[in-house]
Amino acid sequence: MTAMYDKFAAFYDLEYGHKEDDLDFYLSLAQQYGAPVLEIGAGTGRISMLLAEAGYEVVGMDNSMPMLKQAAQNISTLPDNEQNSIKLVLGDMRSFSLEERFPLCIVPFRAFLHNQTQEEQLQTLQCIYDHLTPSGVLAIDVFVPLYHVIENSAWDDEINQDELADPEAGVSISCHIEHNPAIQVLAIQNTYRQDGKKDKICKMKYRYVFRYEMELLLKLAGFEVIQVLGSFEKAPYNYFSGTAIFLARKRA
Ligand SMILES: C[S@@+](CC[C@H](N)C(=O)[O-])C[C@H]1O[C@@H](n2cnc3c(N)ncnc32)[C@H](O)[C@@H]1O
């Protein structure tokens, strides 16, 4: 079966492999709450690898085989002991079942927003709940739906070559975004252009969530919200920051 990110896998590291703003934050959570860490939507291993390099055991789950194949290739560059600390698992965040229980589950870089309906959101949270230890903690980061952005029904964006991990790769990216406010969904179409090659088109969807909607979803799934942050530097939630991070634990 195909997954939303299958076609993105060839470009993901070029576009986001060098993203670093969230690394210290997720590392600090592992230091605070311990391991093994379950990373949902582990992608090409950007964060799982960081945690393994710091000595933590990680299970990285993703529903895209091409993303996991790229992760395996990236992980193969690590020393053996760090490679052995990462277990990659093909699975769907809405319906996974693992033997292990985790003191920390992280859902970085907006992966939670790939749940398209309230039912899917709750299925994901309930699956995570079932995989946490009794005092286990969940961390989810999402973007804040800014009103001046979501007042639009469609817009275009460009990612310049010098914003990519390798500006010399000769790839440019155009994004077209369509917004359906009735269902809070942004449908994103990226066109990847490279000299001498056929354009590649990749599509994905985000269902955005508002702060108190997310808090309610967490409560409905049995969590207690510990903190809502507005930055990876752990500043309190701030609508204008553009980022919202939810920390929650199982309700006693
Ligand atoms: C924005 S990427 C984040 C990758 C990685 N965590 C990072 O921070 O670089 C989102 C990831 O979520 C995965 N994903 C989307 N829907 C999923 C689902 N239903 N179950 C598991 N993974 C999913 C995608 O395949 C993709 O790898």
Image (spheres, rainbow, N blue to C red):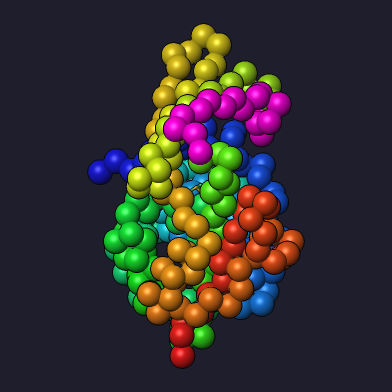
Residue at 56% x, 67% y: name it: 246
Say which of 155 and 134 sits in front: 155
Q: Please, is residue 171 above or below residue 56 in the view?
A: above
Q: Which residues are magenta?
A: 151-166
- Quarter of the rendering containing residue 195: top right
Name the outermost residue toward the bottom.
252
Residue 193 visible within the image: yes
| Relative to 77, 62 lies left or right | left
The quadrant in which the N terminus is found is: top left
Residue 131 x, y percent position in the rendering: 40, 75
Magenta-drawn stretch contains 156: yes
Residue at 59% x, 25% y: name it: 158
Name the outermost residue toward the top.
196
Residue 39 x, y percent position in the rendering: 50, 62
Magenta-drawn stretch contains 157: yes
- Quarter of the rendering containing residue 172: top right
| Relative to 100, 196 lies left or right | right
Say which of 80 and 174 sits in front: 174
Say which of 109 and 72 sits in front: 109
Residue at 61% x, 27% y: name it: 159
Q: Please, is residue 69 above or below residue 38 in the view?
A: above
Residue 70 x, y percent position in the rendering: 49, 42
Disc tally is: 0
Q: Please, is residue 151 above or below residue 83 in the view?
A: above
Residue at 51% x, 52% y: name it: 110
Residue 7 visible within the image: no
Residue 161 x, y percent position in the rendering: 66, 24
